[in-house]
Image (cartoon, helix red, strand yellow):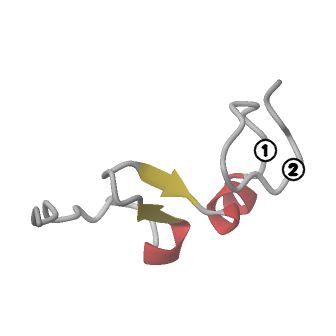
Amino acid sequence: MQSQPPRKKIPGLADDDYYYTPEGYVVFTAKYHLKRGHCCQNGCRHCPYGFKKK
């Protein structure tokens, strides 16, 4: 079993604004998107604005 690399804290973001996937990618939460205040239309996993990429 491989050990996971240490997860870096992202400066300026709260711990509940994002999380890391098992593959090491950063995923922003719906809370973060709502704080940001607009949809970026990139098809984010937790988009609270209902945007779905086609």
Residue 18 placement, left or right of 33: left
Relative to 2, say whether 49 is above or below: above
Disc 1 + disc 2, Cβ < 8 Å? yes
Disc with the residue nearer the chain's start (1 vs 2):
1
- Gap between marks 1 and 2 measured at Cα: 8 Å
User: Which residue reaches farthest right?
Assistant: 50
Residue 12 position within the rendered picture, expressed as x and y whole percent measured from the top left:
40, 61
Residue 38 position within the rendered picture, expressed as x and y whole percent measured from the top left:
78, 44
Mark number, residue 50:
none
Q: Which residue is mark 1?
A: 38
Q: Quadrant of the N terminus?
A: bottom left
Identify the secondary structure beneath mark 1. loop
Q: Nearer the viewer, residue 17 or 54?
A: 54
Q: Nearer the viewer, residue 53 or 10?
A: 53
Residue 50 placement, left or right of 37: right
Q: Please give the name of the residue rendered at 62% of the width and 61% of the height, measured from the top-left corner.
A: 32
Q: Nearer the viewer, residue 1 or 39?
A: 1
Residue 10 position within the rendered picture, expressed as x and y whole percent measured from the top left:
33, 59
Residue 4 placement, left or right of 50: left
Frontmost of labels 1 and 2 is 2
Name the image quarter holding residue 28.
bottom right
Tell me the kind of residue under disc 1.
His
Tell me the kind of residue under disc 2.
Tyr
Q: Please give the name of the residue rendered at 16% of the width and 64% of the height, measured from the top-left corner.
A: 4
Residue 4 placement, left or right of 26: left
Q: Which residue is mark 2?
A: 49
Q: Quadrant of the C terminus?
A: top right
Residue 2 position within the rendered picture, expressed as x and y whole percent measured from the top left:
10, 62
Name the image quarter holding residue 8.
bottom left
